[in-house]
Image (cartoon, rainbow, N blue to C red):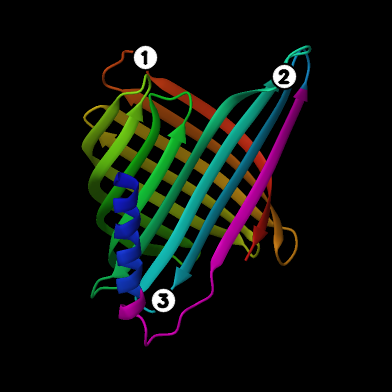
Amino acid sequence: MITRTLLLCWVGVAHLAAHADAATPVQAWTGDLALGLQLSDSESKTRRYTASADLSRRHQRSELSLEFDLDREYVKIPGNQAELDRDRYDLRLKYRHDLQDQALFGYVSPRWRRNASGYYVQAKALRAGFGGRFQPLEPLLLTLEAGAGYRVARVEGGATAREGLGTIAAQARWKLRPGVEWRLEFAHEQSRQERYRTLESSLHTRISEHLGVKVRASYERGYPFSSTDPSAETNLDVSLSYAL
């Protein structure tokens, strides 16, 4: 029921956006897709697959974006079948609409998140808020956002949590030179039962018109208020990317 509600909200927002910008030119989808594979073989064999997408489509006064991260790892001990050790994904859709001052915007954003070994095994949320874009230097673009929303989550052990939440996010994109961009992203989402925070730094290097290499260092911290054991993890990933 909640999933259908979130989908209907998203379809409604997209429908309004299409009518609002029907008479304006629409740019093609831009952004990049990335795939990574890590292999290790010692006492056990490990296969870790990562995938990510960062896509956007700009209208004259609005923007539709999609961000996706997948992290899945299999571990095989000799004499046993491979077991799924890590299973995470995070899908974020967002519709932004510029206010009278085009540096400011309002947004609506559904989010689906899963972490098989986390405090919240699955979470669906609908968020809305305001943000701004700032360009203090020609190659540097800063984005700040703050909002609130509602989340339904399946807690470790099978219980269901329904709660309001607050969220803030910040992003910096710096074009170091043609074909090389550095990004820094921070996101914090908090409710009465959980605090979830991520910090990510990535370097995108183009090696041809469409192909490139993405090096990403990420820090993730989850803290359930009903537990005294916070969880934190740092990862370094190298993946092949394709730019649209």
x, y percentage for residue 86? 57, 27
Q: Residue furthest bottom?
A: 23
Sequence-first disc among 3 and 2:
3
Report whether 181 appears left or right of 46: left
Q: Residue at x 26, y 54 (%)?
A: 128
Q: Is residue 234 left or right of residue 113?
A: right
- Which circle's residue, 1 or 3, is located before the other in the chain? 3
The residue that mark 3 highlights is 59
> How far is disc 1 from disc 3 in space, using C-alphas?
45 Å
Which mark is nearer the camera, 3 or 2? 2
The kind of secondary structure element at disc 2 is loop
Q: Amino acid at mark 1?
A: Asp
Q: Which residue was labeled with disc 2?
A: 81
19 part of magenta stretch: yes
Give the residue type that dot 3 points to.
Answer: His
Numbered label attached to residue 229: 1
Residue 200, numbered label? none
Helix, strand or loop under label 3: loop
Mark 2 residue type: Gln
**Which residue is rendered at x = 60% and y = 58% of the image?**
32
Q: Position of residue 223 (x, y in %)?
A: 34, 24
Q: What is the x, y in percent for residue 160?
A: 29, 29
* Number of the front mark, 1 or 2: 2
Residue visible at 70% across and 22% down in the picture? 82
Residue 103, can we see it? no
Is 91 located above or below residue 192 in the figure?
below
Q: Which residues are magenta?
A: 18-40
